[in-house]
Amino acid sequence: RLRIFYKRFKMKKRNCILIGWLVLLTGCEKAVDLNLNAVAPKIVVEATIENDQPPQVILTNSFQYFSAINLTDLSNSFVRGAEVEISNGRSTHRLKEYRLEPFPGISLFYYGIDSSQLASAFLGELNTNYTLTIRSAGSVYTAQTRIPNITRRIDSLYWKPAPALLNDTSKVALMFRGSDTPGLGDYIRYFTKQNRDPFYPGLNSVFDDQFIDGSSFDVQIERGVPRGAGLSEGYSFFNRGDTVVFKLCNIDKACFDFWRTMEFSYASVGNPFSSPTQVISNIQGEALGYFGGYAAQYKQLIIPR
């Protein structure tokens, strides 16, 4: 009898707790109107330099949090006529503004090497520091980055069938066998290119070497995806017959911190229990974004049908 009474008591207690939570949750419902103050747009910097590649800088103005954005608004958001200079400590080059028109009436703008001033132009080099200076609308913004050495090596790429739980025999897992140079402080960001698609970063694209320092390892590489794209089941796998290019980049700590906090912010959008995340920028001045140096290496794999 004591055992039966105890079971009934536990059941009643569990039901009371559940009912209490339901009452609490429904009782806390309240319409909340957020009246966010309008703020002046800030300049957004997306600047990169990669070994053996020219620098590229994209400047835009930020939007209000709840703004509806279309292609025309995006085209109009580009910052025009800025003075953009990059230095490697030996030479300083002023970048030139270029225009692209991917769609009729829609223009995109970026700053790259001025082909008429090649004497001062340079490509990215390993183990080299860079300084970026931007002058626009009376304000000055600066940033520093470094293209580090390549310390996370791609030894090989291979594939294996996707897990049986996926129930799709056309999908495969891309595997990366690599090695890490001894010594903590190696940071990486990775991208994948699937057939004729552009390179896309992984959903979580940056990692440190805290758990793999100085070791060889095998790990699955999730397929890179465009930000904002809807993700279906099995999105991280590749298809039989794909040609895949894996891009692995050593980056410095500032670049790692920017993408670590940015990707955490992406992942927490819509989650009512997540903590607010401050994206860590390395741009000095009232600006958003980052200036990143990439020590890149590439490896291609053709997956048979």
Image (cartoon, rainbow, N blue to C red):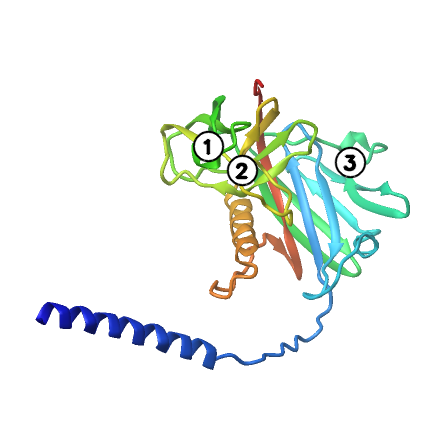
Left or right of 95 in this view: 8: left
Nearest the eye: 253 or 304: 304
Left or right of 106 in this view: 294: left
Please state which of the two labelled residues, at mark 3 or mark 2, is closer to the viewer.
Answer: 2
Task: Determine the image quadrant of residue 302.
Answer: top right
Residue at the disc numbered 1 = 220
Residue at the disc numbered 3 = 113
**Above-or-below relation of 207 to 228:** above
Residue 174 on image: x %, y %? 51, 28
Please state which of the two labelled residues, at mark 3 or mark 1, is closer to the viewer.
Answer: 1
Nearest the eye: 21 or 57: 21
Q: Residues within 10 Å of mark 3 (few under 14, many from 20)?
A: many
Residue 156 on image: x %, y %? 48, 20
Residue 77 on image: x %, y %? 79, 56
Q: Mark 3 or mark 2: name the one nearer the start of the chain.
A: 3
Do the residues bearing badges 3 and 2 touch, measured as CB atoms within 8 Å?
no
Residue at the disc numbered 2 = 236
